[in-house]
Amino acid sequence: MALLPPEEGWYFKKVAKDEKMWIALALVVCLILFFWMVVWHIYGKQNPSFTTYRTTPQEFNALATAFMEKYKTGEMNGIPVVEPPPNSDVFLVAKMWRWEPVLVLKKGQEYRFHISSLDLLHGFSLQPVNMNFMVFPGYDYVLTFKPTSAGEFAIVCNEFCGIGHHMMIGKIIVKE
């Protein structure tokens, strides 16, 4: 931090050769990291890209409720079990302190997930696959999901959302 303001015309003074070299080197490193980030996203198999839309909790809840009523096959601990057809829209709701519905999907088939929260900020963490998203109320996160292995997968809230946070565990069952 300078105690005095810079002298007049400092901006137009020539930059020293070694200072130019450091500026150029920093620029090259920044460009490499920028393009590496894009390559890492595409080829590094990190979290998939998603689209976000504005919505209201009431609108999203109405869509999710209609989805659950249409494809409901049973209940598990009071939570509806839903088996949507492949290549369809799937609605997943986060609310204090549960994920609903329990989804039954088919391995190798593609689904279009819509994820939103009805009350607070929650975290969508699919285990053991390690997909992580923040789920804000008022936003519909849409991502394409294609399960590649069969089994049961847990959805864990990874954003502290209150006293029942530790019990907020959802389930996705993938069948052959």
Image (tube, rainbow, N blue to C red):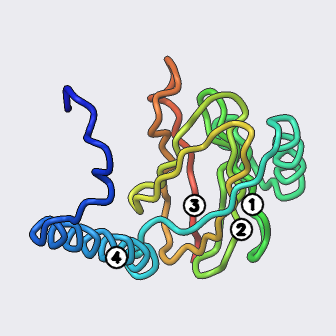
Badge 4: how crowded within 10 Å, few (<14), some, or many (20+)?
few
Question: Which residue lies under the disc numbered 1?
Answer: 90
Q: Which residue is mark 3?
A: 173
Dot placed on the residue nearer the N-terminal end, 3 or 2: 2
Please tell me which of labels 1 and 4 falls first in the chain.
Answer: 4
Judged from this view, the residue extending furthest toward the front is 8
Q: Earlier in the sequence, mark 4 or mark 2?
A: 4
Q: Quadrant of the N terminus?
A: top left
* Separation of marks 3 and 1 at Cα, in angstroms: 14 Å
Q: Amino acid at mark 4?
A: Trp
Q: Residue at x 73, y 50 (%)?
A: 140
Rendered residue at 47%/65% (across/down)? 47
Q: Which residue is mark 4?
A: 36
Q: Earlier in the sequence, mark 3 or mark 1?
A: 1
At 26% from the left edge and 76% from the top edge, which residue is drawn?
28
Local packing at callout 1 (Cα closer than 10 Å; few below 14, some 14-19, many 20+) is: many
- Asked whether 101 or 63 is in front, the reply is 63
| Image disc number at residue 123 | none
